[in-house]
Image (spheres, rainbow, N blue to C red):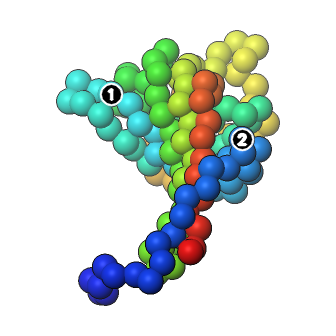
Amino acid sequence: MNTDTSHWFKSHLRDMPRKECFELLESRQVGRVVFIDPDGPLALPVNYVIQDESVLIATSPTNSLSRHVVDRQVAFEVDEIDEFNETGWSVLVRGQASVLTGEHAYVEQEPNPWAEGGRTLMIRITPSHVTGRYLLPA
């Protein structure tokens, strides 16, 4: 492991447009949903899909996600980091989480959960803010 922290040139940040944020979100299957439970802030990795600029997550109706995110403000984050080149990108979605029911329950493509167990509850995160940044080489 290289512990040398000296660099000739530092990488620099560039904000990305909303369209690029969703292109990158659509290119991945796993992100982290961030919410508050009784013990404080928590970030959990989940499988997801993007539909109509919303994040869709399939989960169990009895787990911590279903108990602590429905009808609340949450954050959702996806990133890719290249530690060797000290580059990468990150997209952050902040918005309201809700359960898809009735006429709003239609989804074009369902998330494909990697973990075992029934994932019958579909949660939609409707963005209020979407931001993204690139960390580019110097």
Residue 124 appearing in the image: no
At label 2, which amino acid type do we have?
Arg
Numbered mark located on residue 18 in the image = 2
Give the structural element (helix, strand or loop) at label 1. strand
Relative image position of residue 118 (x, y in whole percent): 49, 38
Number of labelled discs?
Answer: 2
Q: Residue at x 29, y 85 (%)?
A: 4
Q: Is residue 17 left or right of residue 46?
A: right
Q: Residue at x 66, y 43 (%)?
A: 49
The picture quadrant where one finds residue 38 is: top left
Q: Nearer the viewer, residue 138 or 23?
A: 138
Q: Residue furthest front?
A: 8
Relative image position of residue 19 (x, y in whole percent): 76, 44
Determine which residue is flagged by label 1.
36
Establish if 4 lies above or below 105.
below
Bin the neighbour count of mark 1 within 10 Å (Cα to Cα): few under 14, some 14-19, many 20 and up: some
